[in-house]
């Protein structure tokens, strides 16, 4: 009997075992390997020259005035700026589209597919499309602005236009995914709630505020968290559209996010130890942020 109970108790773990294996291979091992490398002066092109430096890579990132300090924290500032600029649009626009597409009107399937379509494209394709639209010479946008006698800014090489182009490209690319999640959540709201609110004399806006938003709260929190995390992983768009520029006198680029700084540090210079230390710091920040948000959400529930 005891052996039978043990076998039964092991069944749930067998179901999650494939996920745990892939998690260990693709998340656990890279993290701990990166943590290990962060204590060394490491060059993957010359592994024999690897030198143990202890906490030096971390100390450099927290020592004001050093090049690594200026470049790393500038990239963190750029990343936070991008998050502040993009996340509201990546929440409000998909929510508005989902509410409209949830109405029983003709053509909803067509518009649903149209808004979601950019999501299936790669970041390289998206970046090239918007680079062609925004480039100063021969770009589609400046072509039409010039046609109407309007100013033609250097979108990709001057601020704040460079950041705006990245935000626009990202919102257009990813809003369809959030829209689908919102739409699925809207369709799960019992229609009886809307009927009861309508009987009580609530108009469309009051039904949205008092019925739709409260019922969407779990999904809304989830969307905000995953969107912020995804925005912190910004890399491809600035790499291909602006190359992290324009340059700043204090060090780093005006559109160089932390992931691009890590990539440059690790593969262009290359200082893998310093790049690994940056990665560990960013990972810890995101873990703390995610944990805090889930704790706040649970307390509210």
Image: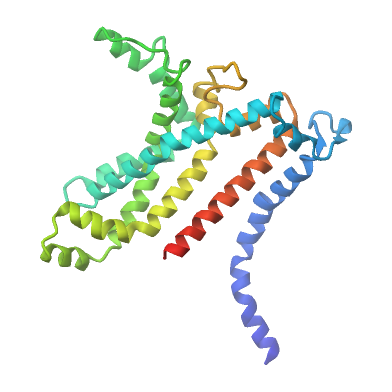
Q: Residue at x 50, y 29 (%)?
A: 237
Which of the image's four quarters has the C terminus?
A: bottom left
To which quarter of the image does residue 164 belong?
A: top left
Q: How is the image coloured?
A: rainbow
Q: Residue at x 73, y 33 (%)?
A: 274
In the image, is 31 to the left or to the right of 51?
left
Place of residue 124 in the rendered image (x, y in percent of width and height, measured from the top left): 50, 30
**Can residue 278 be spotted in the picture?**
yes
Asked if 44 appears above or below 221 in the picture, the reply is above
Asked if 253 appears above or below 88 in the picture, the reply is above
| Front residue of this view, candidates 42 and 17 | 42
Which of the image's four quarters has the N terminus?
A: bottom right
| Front residue of this view, candidates 245 and 7 | 245
In the image, is 224 to the left or to the right of 36?
left
Q: Residue at x 83, y 40 (%)?
A: 54
Place of residue 25 in the rendered image (x, y in percent of width and height, measured from the top left): 68, 52
| Extreme residue in the front direction | 64
Q: Residue at x 28, y 13 (%)?
A: 144
In the image, is 248 to the left or to the right of 209?
right
**Can residue 104 be spotted in the picture?**
no
| Front residue of this view, candidates 97 and 61 | 61
Number of marks in picture: 0
Asked if 56 appears above or below 192 in the picture, the reply is above
Place of residue 96 in the rendered image (x, y in percent of width and height, measured from the top left): 27, 45
Place of residue 92 in the rendered image (x, y in percent of width and height, measured from the top left): 33, 43
To which quarter of the image does residue 112 belong?
A: top left
């Amino acid at each position: 009997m005891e052996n039978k109970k043990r076998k039964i108790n092991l069944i749930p773990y067998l179901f999650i075992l494939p996920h745990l294996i892939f998690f260990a291979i693709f998340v656990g091992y890279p993290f701990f390997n990166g943590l290990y490398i962060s204590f060394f002066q490491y060059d993957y092109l010359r592994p024999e020259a690897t030198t143990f430096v202890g906490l030096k890579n971390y100390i450099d990132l927290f020592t004001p005035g050093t090049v690594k300090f200026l470049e790393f924290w500038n990239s963190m500032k750029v990343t936070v700026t991008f998050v502040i600029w993009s996340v509201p649009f990546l929440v409000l626009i998909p929510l508005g589209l989902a509410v409209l597409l949830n109405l029983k009107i003709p053509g909803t399937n067509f518009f649903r597919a149209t808004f979601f379509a950019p999501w299936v494209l790669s970041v390289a394709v998206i970046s090239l499309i918007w680079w062609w639209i925004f480039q100063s010479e021969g770009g589609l946008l400046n072509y039409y602005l010039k046609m109407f006698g309007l100013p033609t800014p250097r979108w990709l090489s001057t601020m704040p236009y460079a950041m705006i182009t990245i935000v626009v490209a990202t919102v257009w690319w990813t809003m369809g995914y959030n829209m689908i999640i919102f739409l699925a959540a809207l369709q799960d709201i019992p229609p009886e709630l809307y009927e009861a609110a309508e009987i009580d004399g609530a108009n469309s806006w009051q039904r949205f505020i008092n019925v739709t938003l409260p019922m969407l709260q779990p999904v809304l929190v989830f969307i905000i968290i995953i969107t912020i995390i995804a925005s912190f992983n910004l890399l491809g768009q600035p790499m291909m559209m602006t190359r992290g520029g324009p340059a700043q006198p204090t060090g780093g680029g005006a559109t160089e996010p932390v992931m691009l700084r890590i990539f440059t540090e690790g593969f262009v210079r290359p200082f893998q130890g310093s790049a690994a230390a940056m990665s560990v710091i960013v990972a810890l920040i995101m873990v703390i942020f995610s944990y805090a948000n889930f704790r706040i959400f649970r307390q509210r529930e």
